[in-house]
Amino acid sequence: MSKRNWIKIDLHIHTLDDPKDKLDYSARELLARAHRLGFGVLAITLHDEVFDRPEIFAAAERLGILLI
């Protein structure tokens, strides 16, 4: 059997930036936890808005997380 490389991803996750969901964690807190848990790819999704915070994309890159 061949050895496979797996990437842990979450393609639908919200943060307190979301205008409709009342969550208690920031995008930075999400990145820190995702990094601790070994995630390689995240997609921060918001209701009726586009997540556009360059400083968070840069922070994700520094942690080795692809943020889409």
Image (cartoon, rainbow, N blue to C red):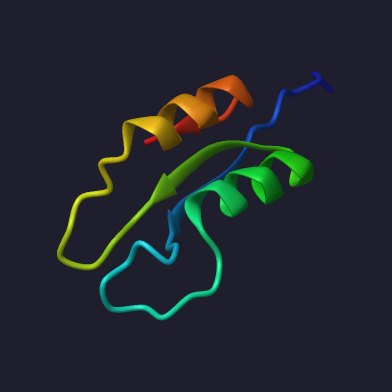
Q: Residue furthest front?
A: 55
Q: Is residue 23 above or below residue 27?
A: below
Q: Position of residue 52 (x, y in %)?
A: 25, 41
Identity of the residue drawn at 31% across and 39% down: 53
The one nearer the camera, 41 or 32, is: 32
Q: Position of residue 66 (x, y in %)?
A: 49, 28
Q: Is residue 61 above or below residue 20?
A: above
Q: Residue furthest left?
A: 48
Please state if 3 lies on the left or on the right of 48 as rendered: right
Identity of the residue drawn at 42% across and 66% down: 16
Q: Position of residue 47 (x, y in %)?
A: 23, 68
Please state if 57 lies on the left or on the right of 7 as rendered: left
Q: Position of residue 56 (x, y in %)?
A: 44, 37
Q: Give the number of marks.
A: 0
Q: Quadrant of the N terminus?
A: top right
The one nearer the camera, 6 or 22, is: 22
Identity of the residue drawn at 33% across and 31% down: 54
Q: Quadrant of the C terminus?
A: top left
* Image quarter of residue 15: bottom left
Q: Is residue 27 above or below residue 19?
A: above
